Amino acid sequence: MINGEKPSVVVFLFQCKINTGYAIEKLEFIFRESAKKKYGEDVNILFTFSECDEMEVLDYKERTGTECMSLSLKKMSPKQLEELKIYLAQFHVRVVVGFDTQPQHWSHRFFRSIGAAKIVSYWGAPMSSLNSGVSLLLKKLEVLSYRHQPDCYVFESSEMADTALNGRGVVGSRVAVCNLGVDTVRYKYKPEFQNYAADQFGIEHGKKILYFSGHMEHRKGVWLLLEAISILKSQGRDDFHLLIFGNKGNEAEYFGKWMLAGDLEAVVTFGGYRLDLDRILSSVYLGVIPSTGWDSFTMSSIEIMSSSVPLIASDLQGLKEAVVPAVNGFSFSSGNAEALANHIALLLENESLRDYLGFNARASVENRYSLETNINRLAKLI
């Protein structure tokens, strides 16, 4: 204690494993920095994630300045709850941020009972399908009945927020939008790396590199992107090469039938999970996010645009908010491989248009989606 006061703590509840890379690792950084921005550099930060049946405190402070607790977030036994209560008794719990926690999540009542000053539910996914009429009214009444629901629900895009308002029935005064942000210094076109990707992957200099980065889940649409590439290849195009990043282990094998059907081995490379995507993006001609299921305002979309690379993305939820058609990229109807192939072909054939879109893409990120803007906004909300 300092002057008789307990040290402050901000608690983040993840319903997935942390320290996995991808966008979640960048969110961990944004969460830490927003907490420090709000409560000062000496604030204690605790990440929890659901991994085991017994509560376990892991010390990550040497690496991140953050403690980490492994516990069951779906259902905790009375013994686990008592252990958690004893552990947190040493702190003044300033705010609890639950990742994708529904209005009735058990943790809200628990943290209210130990004096948490504020509870925030942060969403990187849709909260619900949309409802209307009597169904929506009943949802609203249901949510209003929850005594311990969060003070604020934060979404990465307006479309995602709408799933709370007109899907789950959350009151509008509790809903806020906080777009993601990117490090515009790190993700910036650097001419010294213009051939970096070609040299790393043995691609002929002069080939226009197409780029995808993300998980290999079916809804991310990598299979659709391969179908579009197959269309381009069948048209006799040989002026491009597609780099796909994010695959781990044997995940690329899932796409073997699309690779084989389109005879794509010579024009497509699965590059794995890498930490040098900022350098690779300086080599990229255009980026593609071909999602076919739901998708929010993705980290990869603003990393691409921050690097002065135009983005072609499907017209889903938050992706629509990242792309202004014919200004910083193009949108296409989700699932339409031919439309995607046509947009790619248009930019392959028109370098001046590509450069115009890339310039605007960078400007849009600098103006609206910088890391500093993201951290300041989230700090204000918590």
Image (tube, rainbow, N blue to C red):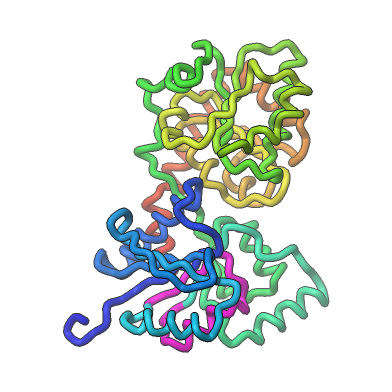
Most extreme residue toward the front, as rendered? 54
**From the viewer's perspective, is 261 left or right of 280?**
right
Q: Is residue 95 visible?
A: yes
Query: Where residue 111 sits in the image (x, y, percent)?
Result: 47, 82
At 50% from the left edge and 42% from the top edge, which residue is drawn?
Answer: 302
To which quarter of the image does residue 328 belong?
top right
To which quarter of the image does residue 268 belong?
top right
Query: Where residue 96 sits in the image (x, y, percent)?
Result: 45, 74
**From the viewer's perspective, is 257 left or right of 52?**
right
What is the number of callouts on the image? 0
Does residue 143 sit above or below 234 in this rendering?
below
User: Is 107 in the magenta?
Assistant: yes
User: Is 119 in the magenta?
Assistant: no
Quadrant in which the C terminus appears? bottom left
Magenta residues (range): 94-118
Query: Where residue 331 sits in the image (x, y, percent)?
Result: 67, 38
Q: Nearer the viewer, residue 51 or 298?
A: 51
Query: Where residue 297 sits in the image (x, y, percent)?
Result: 57, 50
Q: Is residue 362 visible?
A: no
Does residue 368 sit above or below 282 in this rendering?
below
Quadrant in which the N terminus appears? bottom left
At 30% from the left edge and 60% from the top edge, which residue is drawn?
Answer: 61
At 60% from the left edge and 43% from the top edge, which residue is drawn?
Answer: 215
To which quarter of the image does residue 31 belong?
bottom left
